[in-house]
Image (cartoon, helix red, strand yellow):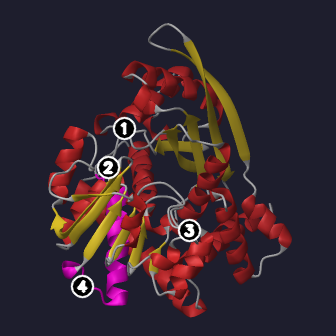
Amino acid sequence: MTTFLECVEQNLDEAAELLGLTESEKEAIKMPYRELSVVIPIKMDNGSVRRFKGFRIQHNTSLGPAKGGIRFHPDETIDTVRSLASLMCWKCSLAGLPLGGGKGGIICNPKELSIDELQRLSRGYINAVADIIGDTNDIMAPDVYTNPQTMAWMMDQWEIIKRKNNPGIITGKPIILGGSLGRNNATAMGGIYTLREAAKKLNINLKDATFITMGFGNAGMHFATLMYDTFGSKLIAASDSKGAIYNQNGINPYELKKWKEEYGTVYTYPKAIPMIDPEKMLELETDVLVLAALEGVITEKNAENIKAHVICELANGPVFLAADHILYRNGVHVIPDFLCNAGGVTCSHYESIQNRMADSWSEEDVYRRLDNKITEVYNQVYELHKKKGTDMRHAAFMIAISRVLESMKLRGIV
């Protein structure tokens, strides 16, 4: 089976062929600039010492400092981090941000760690990578199983090491420590803007639309409530790591959010039917399928069974390459991850700007800027997709690769 890294590299290869790149140019855009593997010894609450493996990868910094999240996950691998660092490069380029691509990860199960152990692990990671991060070379942010509190610990540890105040070295922070208003909802909000534009192009009335959310976590939860508030769309199914639920008559996303916060899962929500096979949820009839979990949930094995009209990739890499071709052939409009979820990194960039200016913007101002940016980028990708007769993902890659390659040529790297 194709791995996530192979899928990313195959997408790059196909986009490079469409652009007519040379072998040297292909190699230049695919190879990461820097990879760091670290071991982090942490004293546990019971007095024992455990050693955790961690990574930080900077894929390309020709457009500006690396930018990317840090993930805590038991199944983290360096190949996953490589894939995500590459995607961050293309995401920043596509959005027209003066940033490169980076990503980090620690192999751990945060659900098994106490709050004190999580803090020691967060600070230990910064101790290990402090020399290669900072607002002029690599800016970190939250990702899977990390949050504003994690970012606060990491920022504080970096400032202790460097003996200076510099909140811009990390984004996604608590508001009181230099975080940006609107950042918490930014990924979902950016996804909403792309879906709104797609609906215009495809003549879909979102007021009457149904949608399914795979991954009712932070981004998926916010997306569901925004769909409900903005368009009046009807949530008919949702899932998290413990299972999936379904109700053709609709599920109130606010009630479901409250239930999950209280009981830890959507699976026990009493106003919907639990599904025996959660993967079958993907194959239900719906207008919009929101993929907000992990990578590789739609492959060549189930792509033919997808009945959604639009797929919103809020997660990174949820649709693999072979599936992409099948979905495109079947007329499914896929809004690719590094366009659909670009609201997060865009608002992170806005946070960095506010930190450098020692200023703060209103939530309204942040969302206005984000709407303008995401709408512009979506329409650029859509126009190229129609012009070239290719799917949205390859059109997005073509735009992003062209910008990175131009910057590398101007620098004399290529």
Helix, strand or loop for disc 3:
loop
The residue under the point 58% across, 91% down is 389
Pick the front one: 321 or 236: 236
Where does the image place residue 248, in percent across and percent down from the top left?
21, 71
The residue under the point 59% across, 80% down is 325
Residue farthest to the front, as pictured: 276
- In this rendering, the answer to whether 72 lies above or below 303 is above
Q: Which mark is residue 138?
A: none
Front: mark 4 or 3: 3
Helix, strand or loop for disc 4:
loop
Q: Earlier in the sequence, mark 3 or mark 2?
A: 2
Rendering quarter of residue 292: bottom left
Q: Earlier in the sequence, mark 1 or mark 2?
A: 1
Contact (Cβ within 8 Å) of mark 1 with mark 3: no
Query: Type of residue at label 2?
Result: Asn
- In this rendering, the answer to whether 269 lies above or below 63 is above
- In this rendering, the answer to whether 401 lies above or below 343 is below
Query: Type of residue at label 3?
Result: Thr
Query: Type of residue at label 1?
Result: Pro
The span shown in magenta is 182-208
Spatial distance from mark 1 to mark 3, Cα to Cα? 33 Å
Helix, strand or loop for disc 1:
helix
